[in-house]
Amino acid sequence: MLKEKVEKALNNQILIEADSSQIYLAMASWAETQGLGGTAQFLYRHSDEERIHMLKLVQYINERGGKAVIPALPKPEKDFKTLNNLFQTLLKHEIMVSDKINDLVEVCLKEKDYTTQNFLQWYVAEQTEEEALAKTIIDKLNMIGSDKSGLYMFDRDIETISVQSNTVTPK
Ligand code: FEO
């Protein structure tokens, strides 16, 4: 049975993961309207991944005798101005998510809920990979600068990159 504090903290993480999915969906749609089809596909997949992160939490809470709360979501930003700005926003968001996961682990340790703490290790590993991937993408974009052919190749290559755990390298 989940302790109240753990259940509350896990439910808060449902909101964060669902919000991430929504934000990346908005980013994907923006990229698509800019003619960046590869980037759009990458972001659509990222959005799907975040939904899976949310689902895992929903199911975990319910399996452990708690009640998952499906939250309302704020409207995401819709104009990201430049690709670099978009990925800077994404990285900042992921750093915030990592902090929240760490807070959640802290709650579990305080409450001596080692089962949930163990369950969360998957999220800890996932965050490390997501942050590293976002940083790599920003480095690439900085190298490309305003070079149009570089941007064309970036958009082509990013289509095959997966954000899923342990598959940071191209498929
Ligand atoms: Fe599930 Fe990227 O946070």
Image (tube, rainbow, N blue to C red):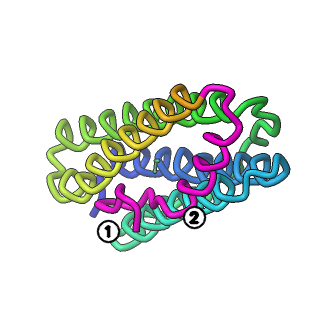
The percent coordinates of residue 88 (x first, y second) are 57, 28
Label 1 sits on a secondary structure element that is loop
In the displayed orientation, state which residue is furthest to the front: 149
In the displayed orientation, state which residue is furthest to the right: 33
Label disc, if present, on residue 45 of the rendered structure? none
The percent coordinates of residue 130 (x first, y second) are 40, 45
Tell me if residue 27 comes above or below residue 96 in the rendering.
Answer: below
Tell me if residue 154 comes above or below residue 49 in the rendering.
Answer: above
Could you classify mark 2 by the number of other residues whose Cα lies within 10 Å: few (under 14), some (14-19), or many (20 or more)? some
Q: Which residue is located at x 39 percent, y 38 percent? A: 131
Q: Which residues are magenta?
A: 145-171
Tell me if residue 61 comes above or below residue 63 in the rendering.
Answer: above
Which residue has dot 2 on it?
A: 48
Say whether residue 83 is magenta.
Answer: no
Label 2 sits on a secondary structure element that is helix
Tell me if residue 95 comes above or below residue 112 in the rendering.
Answer: above
Counting the numbered discs, the total is 2
Q: Nearer the viewer, residue 162 or 145?
A: 145
Quadrant for the C terminus in the image: bottom left
Which residue has dot 1 on it?
A: 64
Q: Nearer the viewer, residue 38 or 143?
A: 143
Q: Amino acid at mark 1?
A: Arg
The residue carrying mark 2 has its beta carbon less than 8 Å from ligand 1? no
Q: Nearer the viewer, residue 36 or 56?
A: 36
The percent coordinates of residue 155 (x first, y second) are 63, 51
Q: Which residue is located at x 51 percent, y 53 percent? A: 14
Q: Are marks 1 and 2 in contact (CB under 8 Å)?
A: no
The residue carrying mark 1 has its beta carbon less than 8 Å from ligand 1? no
